[in-house]
Amino acid sequence: MEFGIKIEGASGFHFLYPAALFASKSPTLVNTILGSCVAVCLWDPVLKIGGINHFMLPFWNGQGLASPKYGNIAIERLYEKMLSMGSNPANLKAKVFGGGEVIETNIKQFHIGERNSEIAFRMLDELKIPVISQSVGGKLGRKIQYNTETGEVKHKFIQKQTAGYPNVNS
């Protein structure tokens, strides 16, 4: 199946932007594009419901708005949303995607993708939610599609593109 084509069983379609989360009791296909950002997909196989976040930075520092732009806020809010929809914490399963180092640097503090992945795994471990699938790290971005009813995630890598300008003098 190619991305963007509605599949049987899904009644909705949603594009998830960075710094946002989505969860629904209605079967929905959720698409998002990740570079150094990370998406955590939570799925309840008993209720057949799911949710996903898309965060850009690992930690909220306590200043300004505590938004899902930050991993520690995005994971906590997604977890709370799943519980508010009736999920038993013991039933939740997780899948983690993204965290690519799409901007090359040798300065450790700028390795946002790696730091985003680390906070996701650490928080899921603290919440005792098993990670049943993952595709993190590397040098490429990812496009993912998450089915909230089945927990299925399809993903493909996005090749780097170089910005170039045509030679107008030729």
Image: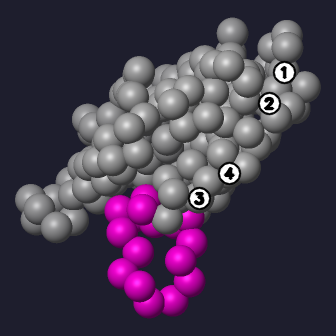
Residue 146 in the image: above or below residue 51: above
In this picture, residue 152 sits left or right of residue 157: right
Magenta part mainly helix, strand or loop? loop
Please give the residue where the numbered disc 3 appears in the rendered image.
77
Dot 1 or dot 2: first in sequence order is 1
Mark 4 or mark 2: name the one nearer the start of the chain: 2
Q: Check disc 1: other Cα within 10 Å, few if <14, some if 14-19, many if 20+.
A: some
- Is 69 included in the stretch rendered in magenta? yes
Contact flag, marks 1 and 2 (Cβ < 8 Å): yes
Element under disc 3:
helix
Q: Residue at x 41, y 21 (%)?
A: 132
What amino acid does circle 2 point to? Thr
The alpha-carbon separation of the residues under discs 4 and 2 comes to 16 Å
Residue 124, percent from left and from top: 38, 43
Q: Are marks 1 and 4 in contact (CB under 8 Å)?
A: no
Q: Residue at x 85, y 14 (%)?
A: 9
Query: Is label 4 in a helix, a strand or a loop?
Result: helix
- Asked if residue 62 is among those painted magenta in the image, a careful observer would answer yes
Amino acid type, label 1: Ala
Q: Amino acid at mark 3?
A: Arg
Q: Which mark is residue 28?
A: 2
Q: Position of residue 77 (x, y in %)?
A: 59, 58
User: What colour scheme governs how the chains and residues are painted in the rendered image of this protein?
Assistant: one colour
Question: Residue at 26% of width from left, 35% of height from top?
Answer: 138
The residues colored magenta run: 56-72
Distance between the alpha carbons at the discs numbered 1 and 2: 5 Å
- The reply to whether dot 3 and dot 1 touch (C-beta < 8 Å) is no
Q: Is residue 35 visible?
A: no
Task: Identify residue type, mark 4.
Answer: Lys
Tell which of 56 and 83 is nearer to you: 83
